[in-house]
Image (spheres, grey):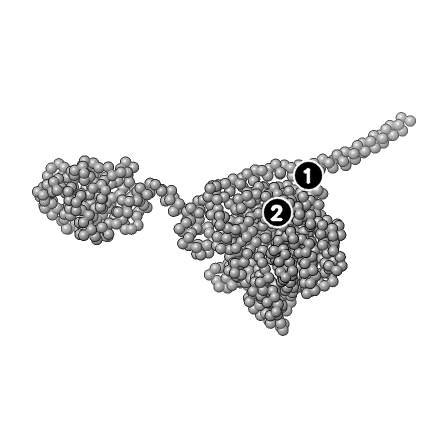
């Protein structure tokens, strides 16, 4: 045997002819060079008994074992999975192109890669030593050097396809390894993106992954790295340029220019009804600051502003035949005209909880059906007076609070505690009133004014505590039906949700009542009420976990809350800005919007209220928690739009800090801070103003042309800009203090000094005499 055709010695560990990297095989011409393989990508050595024609650098085939067994592959090179150390056939950095050596080296077999176990009793190496050298010495050199190159170029493809198809299929992973290196080097970042989605999927709600698995897996890398909301924003019709307020909470001037008393004027003046005995008598002084507040809206570049018209400011007694206050009409005329002059579209709410006190005293408020006609007269007057300029009308804002907190628990005006009946009766009359007002506009004004009439419902989302417990699932759905479905289902379908009729009817029967405490609609009323909604307003703030709980049904124990047979819970890990009822749970917003879509045939939706208050640091203008809240909730709304929910607009609650009902001024929802200690009620922008302004300008979040880090830059810049406003706010009490010192303390001290000096002089004169 020549020095260039030595046979490999058998390793004591593998008992196979392991080929050393220094042992060279017969030289092949430079035209038939084999690519040198990296020492990390090990291939099984070819047995000398099966001759494999040398392959050109362009048609490499994997070396096959002499017995062609699939199981003989090393545990580190299994089919099809690849070892974590050999994820792709990484080419050696020094041999990225198949560099050919004049002396072809075969890949050395590692001592750890064992070929099909050969028994130590089967003396295979002995046979190889006796027979192979002779065969190699006698015939191989001539065939390799003289005729093989021609055979490779002319007939190899046919030989491979005809006689070795099984061998080609068995070695397919090798073919993959040959073609992937270039792709890996070109798109290596893709390998990084493949490992990130799993981390993000862990934090997403399970229902998102279940409902759109294919689309998320196929497109997730780009959407996650380049901002998912931006891609949703391109096709969504919603306009994120709205803010909101209400008459009693912001106007003040409770007894000025002929305004009559409302139930909240009377209720807030009762001691102990409102926290710290606050009232809305002056509130933000919005009645006198119309132009100033509109300038704030213009700075934000709003295109819609939702406000309410005070019923007792237009009709002091609530009855049209008694008196119509022209000064009240003039105020709202000026407000609407100023909004339109600044390209801001008014959205008018007809009832935001300020029922005229006369109607409460005379009829019992919403407990009496007579109020329906009086409210319809008020609405018709508004349509007649303002309808040529107002195209969006909302009949009631959050009737759930009017019914439950006004007539069930007594926490809100008028403060009645009619447990088990008051809330249902009030809601029944409100639904009838809404339908009557809608028909009035539809028959008398729609043809001329081309406007829309809807209702704004507030609702929390209910999530089952245990998603595998059917009772918890039913309780969570019941929670939403008793909240949103109570009003939405009659308006869209003509009658109350079946679950309400079943539960309240059963509880009433257990109490020995002949009829259900839930009123019923006649067949004519059902037809009259059904479909009386051009759009649906949704107000949403938070979410609750819901679980089943059975309450007793004895006499005296009935109430709206016990009729539901459930209890709401909160997760202590949810962000809590300080308010006892509001937790930041953004994923519940998306689920509520999808619930409305599925229950009511995807109506046109306007988000009429969404925001967060704070009790901690009420004088802090750097409200980064509010920025995070808006970012998360708007993002979930955009996801709902991607789900197909027909959302047309988003309204943040609210423009200014204001009177917050039974909480007084202890909670602040506004983007602008109002100093209620100052009689002028000055406004100071919070950091959230700058952030919301950016969202308005982009109508969402940045698109693909802007990096996602831009959103974080918005937050950082907004927080920085609030420092100057903080200094002004801090200086304002100091200025007031100095004014007090100058105007009161200094003259008082001077007067005392003069008196003391006079007394001392008199004492000296007497002593001298």
On screen, residue 39 above or below 395: above
State how many labels appear. Answer: 2
Q: Pinpoint residue 588: horizontal percent, then vertical percent.
A: 52, 54
> For this view, does 476 lie left or right of residue 752?
left
Q: Pinpoint residue 690: horizontal percent, then vertical percent.
A: 57, 41
User: Which residue is disc 2 drawn over?
Assistant: 344
Q: Pinpoint residue 375: horizontal percent, then vertical percent.
A: 68, 60
- Which of the 4 image quarters holds residue 423? bottom right
**Badge 1: residue crowd in 10 Å (few <14, some 14–19, many ≥20):** some
Residue drawn at the location 55% of the way across and 56% of the way down: 604
Q: Is residue 404 visible?
A: no
Mark 2 element type: loop
Q: Pinpoint residue 72: horizontal percent, then vertical percent.
A: 23, 51
Q: Quadrant of the N terminus?
A: top left
On screen, residue 721 above or below 442: above
Please state which of residues 669 and 572 is positioned toward the viewer in this rendering. 669
Q: CA distance from mark 2 to mark 1?
A: 34 Å
User: Which residue is disc 1 drawn over?
Assistant: 733
On screen, residue 154 above or below 368: above
Q: Quadrant of the C terminus?
A: top right
């Amino acid at each position: 045997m020549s020095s260039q055709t030595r046979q490999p010695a058998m390793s004591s560990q593998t008992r196979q002819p392991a080929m050393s990297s220094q042992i060279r095989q017969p030289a092949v011409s430079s035209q038939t060079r084999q690519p040198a393989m990296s020492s990390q990508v090990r291939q099984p050595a070819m047995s000398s008994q099966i001759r494999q024609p040398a392959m050109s650098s362009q048609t490499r085939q994997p070396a096959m074992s002499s017995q062609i067994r699939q199981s003989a592959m090393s545990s580190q090179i299994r089919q099809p999975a690849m070892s974590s150390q050999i994820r792709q056939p990484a080419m050696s950095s020094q041999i990225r192109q198949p560099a050919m050596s004049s002396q072809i080296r075969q890949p050395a077999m590692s001592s750890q890669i064992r070929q099909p176990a050969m028994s130590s009793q089967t003396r295979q190496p002995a046979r190889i030593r006796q027979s192979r050298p002779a065969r190699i010495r006698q015939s191989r050199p001539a065939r390799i050097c003289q005729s093989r190159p021609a055979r490779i170029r002319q007939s190899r493809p046919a030989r491979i396809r005809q006689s070795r198809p099984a061998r080609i299929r068995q070695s397919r992973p090798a073919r993959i390894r040959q073609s992937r290196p270039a792709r890996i080097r070109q798109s290596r970042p893709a390998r990084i993106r493949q490992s990130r989605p799993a981390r993000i999927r862990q934090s997403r709600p399970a229902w998102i992954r279940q409902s759109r698995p294919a689309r998320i897996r196929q497109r997730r890398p780009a959407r996650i790295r380049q901002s998912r909301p931006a891609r949703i924003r391109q096709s969504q019709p919603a306009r994120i340029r709205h803010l909101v307020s209400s008459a009693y909470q912001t106007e003040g001037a409770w007894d000025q220019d002929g305004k009559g008393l409302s139930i909240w004027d009377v209720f807030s003046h009762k001691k102990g009804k409102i926290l710290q005995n606050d009232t809305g008598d002056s509130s933000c002084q919005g009645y006198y600051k119309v132009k100033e507040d509109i300038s704030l809206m213009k700075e934000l570049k709003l295109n819609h502003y939702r406000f309410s018209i005070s019923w007792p400011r237009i009709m002091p007694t609530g009855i049209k035949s008694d008196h119509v206050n022209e000064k009240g009409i003039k105020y709202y005329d000026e407000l609407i005209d100023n909004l339109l002059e600044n390209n801001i579209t008014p959205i008018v709410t007809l009832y935001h909880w300020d029922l005229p006190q006369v109607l409460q005293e005379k009829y019992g408020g919403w407990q009496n059906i007579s109020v329906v006609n009086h409210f319809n007269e008020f609405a018709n007057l508004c349509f007649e007076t303002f309808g040529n300029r107002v195209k969006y009308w909302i009949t009631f804002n959050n009737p759930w609070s009017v019914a439950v907190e006004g007539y069930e628990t007594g926490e809100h005006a008028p403060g009645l505690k009619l447990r088990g009946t008051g809330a249902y009766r009030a809601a029944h009359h409100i639904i009838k009133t809404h339908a009557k007002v809608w028909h009035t506009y539809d028959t008398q004004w729609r043809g001329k004014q081309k406007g829309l009439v809807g209702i704004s419902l507030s609702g929390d989302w209910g999530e089952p505590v245990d998603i595998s417990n059917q009772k918890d699932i039913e309780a969570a759905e019941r929670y939403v039906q008793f909240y949103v479905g109570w009003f939405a289902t009659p308006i869209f379908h003509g009658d109350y949700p079946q679950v309400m009729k079943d539960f309240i009817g059963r509880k009433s029967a257990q109490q020995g009542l002949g009829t259900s405490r839930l009123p019923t609609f006649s067949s004519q009323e059902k037809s009259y009420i059904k479909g009386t909604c051009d759009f649906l307003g949704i107000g949403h703030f938070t979410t609750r976990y819901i679980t089943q709980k059975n309450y007793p049904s004895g006499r005296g124990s009935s109430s709206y809350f016990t009729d539901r047979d459930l209890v709401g819970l909160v997760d202590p890990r949810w962000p809590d800005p300080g308010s006892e009822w509001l937790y930041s749970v953004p994923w519940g917003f998306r689920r509520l919007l999808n619930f409305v879509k599925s229950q009511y045939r995807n109506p046109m939706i306007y988000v009429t209220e969404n925001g967060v208050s704070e009790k901690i640091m009420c004088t802090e203008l750097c409200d980064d928690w509010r920025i995070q809240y808006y970012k998360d909730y708007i993002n979930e709304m955009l996801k709902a739009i991607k789900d197909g929910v027909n959302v047309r607009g988003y309204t943040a609650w609210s423009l200014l800090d204001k009177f917050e009902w039974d909480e007084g001024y202890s909670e602040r929802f506004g983007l602008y801070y109002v100093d209620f200690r100052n009689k002028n009620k000055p406004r100071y922008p919070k950091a959230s103003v700058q952030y919301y302004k950016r969202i308005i300008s982009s109508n969402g979040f940045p698109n693909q042309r802007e990096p996602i880090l831009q959103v974080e830059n918005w937050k950082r810049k907004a927080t920085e800009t609030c420092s100057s406003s903080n200094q002004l706010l801090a200086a304002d009490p100091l200025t007031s203090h100095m004014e007090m010192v100058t105007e009161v303390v200094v003259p008082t001290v001077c007067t005392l000094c003069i008196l003391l000096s006079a007394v001392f002089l008199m004492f000296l004169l007497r002593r001298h005499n």
